[in-house]
Image: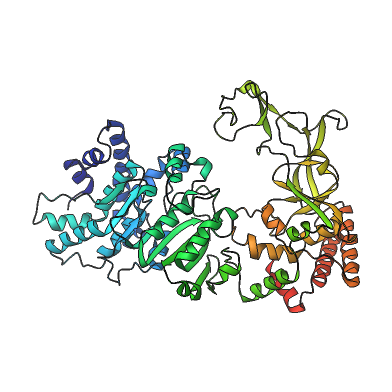
Amino acid sequence: MLDFIEYLKKEKIVDKLLDNYLPDLDHSGTVASINEILEKLENEGEKIRRRKKSESSKQNHDLIGFFYEKGLDETTRKTGGEFYTPKKVVDYILDGIGYIPMKEIRNKKLIDISCGSGSFLIEAIKRIVSSFNLEIISFIEAEAIVESIRNNICGLDINPIACVLCQINIQYALFPLLEIIRNKKSNFVFPLFKILNQNAIEFIPPELFDYVVGNPPYVFIRDIPENQRKIIENSTLESIKGQYDLYQLFIEIGIKILKQAGFLGYIIPDSLLALSNRDVIRRYIYNNAKILEIVQIGPQFEDPVVSNVIILLQKEDELNERKSNIMKITQSNSEKAIMLKQDLIERWNYQFLININSKDIEIMEFLENSQPTLEDISLKPEFRISIFRGVELGKEGMIFYCDNCGKYHPLPRKSMICRACKEKVRKSQIQKIIHESIQGSPTVNFRRFISALQRYKVKEVKYIDITKKGINYKTLHEYKDRIIIRQLTQDGMICASFDKESLTSQSIYNLRIIESNVSEFNHFYLLGLLNSKLLAYYFRKSFGSYKELFPRILIERLRRLPIKIPLKKKEKALASKIESSVKAVLSLEEEDTEDFQKLQTKIDGLVFDLYEIKDADKSYIFNAT
């Protein structure tokens, strides 16, 4: 039996591939790195051969990619968005778009425009090969399979080393065919497969594809290298408006290079579903494709800063076909799927709300049609409402004094370079602006600073120096008597409290009613609404349900919450009861006591009555939050 590693060495495959992708560079260091990966492949292959077949099937489908990613430093991985894709994800996507051995897939064209070492391509090739009985096929058929794969399976990657590894990976997947062919043609060597070292943004396909699959890079605009950003901004892509992420460009490109009725399957961040910055790509999808399925699967990679979804699309030019399409919405932790008509997306202002059913739609439409949003109220002449983020500082609250600028700046998160003048930040320039404690009472130079917040309660107070020229503290008098709201929810609930004069970090919003001609519409009444089960339910279903990992309340979402203005006598009476109950909660020493729970239950009941929620819906909402 032929040995794959021996074949690579004998035919000098690695050198040939490096000559092809990196013709003008010294390959010695790269060859050593690739050989190290191949040595791990060989060792792992020997272990697999010793195991039972059933155990072997559980192993990584793309060992080369697995070992390659392990060898990358964190910066390279994140900048390039290079993350190995788990087999269960690859399988789900290929199954979902119908790329299965039972179908005639051999002559269908499939591409991954961010292929890396080839996780999707390898599995696609294995599915083609699995349609044949390798024990009885002739060398002519074996050659035909190899040629068919060379013609129909295509990959792109901006990293030439990834392209080299992908070529090797394909040869590894097809290696059983090599032995069959070499029985007749002893000098046969695998051809170069269609793995192009190319930036997907500049890719002009010679033909359209039946399938587009992949795990596109997740790289936010600020982290995209400047040379790449220029290429992107000079492109004709429609989805580069605003604060874009690379993955949304790859969705647009993927749809563009599909044949009519062709299929796309990607694993992407769930920020696609409702984040305002992704509105442009959601509209592009809605206007160009049927959404076949969205699967909420949560974090899928080792560094869990992103929660993921799988999205399966079919290119469709006809508007009526898209509108009448039925979308399948699947949660990874549930066996039940929700079926929704695609035209609902228009009614949801092009948000992909995936944790929703017909009952939710009914309740949400009732709330939206019967109540103004907080933003609507703030535009009324009889109300003045201010919503703003706190002091613009980094997470650690450190600052530095730039001699060149002559003022203070928040300490940069990554490279120690002043963003304003590009001067290098010296260690001696760095200092604290937030202090655990100060001598005596707060002075004219220091103010209380809220660093931790729970529902109704400020949990941690520090002190901030307010004398540092250049730091954006916001308007200091605005911090008086207001509601404070944490960006992160607490146990699925909006987390808000009341504060008289402390400053906050930018991860805490400040909501101040400056003027109201309805005395019952005040801070304590509004605080009761924000912390209620009803508004937590509305937030989760309309804005927050997509976000599994770090559910954030963005200012824009806050402004769009349905808020009842108590105008009638009965409404004002309920509002007054909410106000007094909230004040009672705020006076409690401890949260999560029996008294607290009783008061919160009372507030929830008052809010339900105020919004005229049906009894059957009260129970449903209560159990949904």
Task: Tell me residue 292's x, y (percent).
Answer: 46, 69
Pick the front one: 452 or 67: 452
Pick the front one: 508 or 373: 373
Q: Is residue 79 visible?
A: yes
Look at the picture and state if 501 lies above or below 581. above
**From the viewer's perspective, is 421 left or right of 537?**
left
Residue furthest to the front: 381
Q: Is residue 52 visible?
A: no
Task: Tell me residue 320's x, y (percent).
Answer: 47, 75
User: Residue at the spot x=9%, y=54% of the render?
Assistant: 185
**From the viewer's perspective, is 540 left or right of 227?**
right
Pick the front one: 404 or 65: 404
Look at the picture and state if 440 lies above or below 338. above
Look at the picture and state if 218 lies above or below 289. above
Task: Tell me residue 441's x, y (percent).
Answer: 88, 32
Pick the front one: 217 or 177: 217
User: Residue at the spot x=36%, y=62% of the render?
Assistant: 258
